[in-house]
Amino acid sequence: MSSRTHKPANRALSELRRDYQLWLMVLPAIAVVFLFNYVPMYGIQLAFRDFDFSKGLTGGEWRGLHYFSQFIHSYQFGDLMKNTFFISLATIVLGFPAPILLALILNQVKWVRAKKFLQTIVYMPHFISIVVMVGLLNVLLSPNTGIVGHLISSIGHTDLNLLASTRSFVPVFVLSDIWQHVGWNSIIYLAALSTVDPSLYDAAKMDGANKWKTMLHVDIPALVPTIIILFILSMGNVLSTGFEKVFLMQNSLNLPVSEVISTYVYKIGIVSNQFSYSAAIGLFNTFINFVFLYTMNWIAKRNSDISLW
């Protein structure tokens, strides 16, 4: 019994000695993940206590679910959930298929130089920072000096500021997000398409299939596993709209549609110093995201046998 017990341990030690260079290489990444993803979990208790600087993180009075109940029964709850869901779902509905379509189109380009040029063009916006992106939107959409503003004025819509309009905030946010990330997000789909067996294309050509039918019966089925996994992950972020861009695009005129959970948490926690309340809202947000992630993973596993776990 003792020899059998020691065999797995000895095997693990021998593998560790053999691959110690690889472990040393990934050790910094493991340390970063542990430091910034696991250590902060100790602060989750802040959502259940009355935080007091003088008493420290664990010294505050235990309040249980008080702050969760306070948020759910607050008058802002409905608008915050509606705005967050609307922006997130619009981004998923319009933004999720875009890189798939782009990857399918780029996969049809056979001229290598043209393909590399197009890929470079569509990848570049991803490397623009959020601050610069919002600055570009302000310049382009300005009703006085922007190119788009002048075009809108020329067709009779004078003094129309798209960034200050409650109607146009979400379309501007979603379309600019697609433009910035569609190229970068298409890389993983192009990688999946590169693994397709060339004999499948030859067989489709021999059967008389045109490009559309080849795409429909060869390319898209090859992308299905990747699409399912990425869709599950995207639904796990359904209440995470991206604080930076929303906050930078936000102003007093579009606030009724641009105030989302992440910006509200910032204002309540950092600006108003209601740390326990903001922590409870953030934890509530994380819980809802997890519910969506778990539900979509369950649905995918039941219907396609493709899932995260």
Image: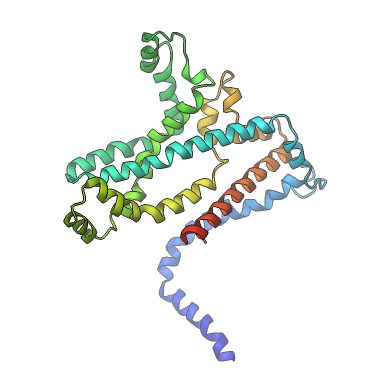
Q: Position of residue 278 (x, y in %)?
A: 69, 38
Q: Position of residue 142 (x, y in %)?
A: 43, 16
* Residue 266 seen anywhere in this rendered image of the structure: no
Residue extending furthest right?
A: 61
Residue extending furthest front?
A: 207
* Residue 212 seen anywhere in this rendered image of the structure: yes
Res 100 → quadrant: top left
Q: Is residue 41 left or right of residue 235?
A: right
Count of all numbered marks drawn on residues in the image: 0
Which residue is at 41% across, 51% downward? 227
Of residues 281 and 296, the one drawn nearer to the viewer in this rendering:
296
Res 257 → quadrant: top right
Which residue is at 73% across, 41% downward? 276
Residue 60's place in the image compared with 303, above or below, is above
| Viewport quadrant of the N terminus | bottom right
Residue 143's place in the image compared with 79, above or below, is above
Residue 253's place in the image compared with 75, above or below, is above
Q: Is residue 38 left or right of residue 93?
A: right
Q: How is the image coloured?
A: rainbow
Q: Position of residue 7 (x, y in %)?
A: 52, 85
Q: Is residue 241 left or right of residue 179?
A: right
Of residues 243 and 55, the one drawn nearer to the viewer in this rendering:
243
Q: Position of residue 179 (x, y in %)?
A: 38, 33
Which residue is at 72% across, 46% downward? 46
Which residue is at 18% across, 46% downward? 110
Of residues 6 and 76, the one drawn nearer to the viewer in this rendering:
76
Residue 249's place in the image compared with 302, above or below, is above
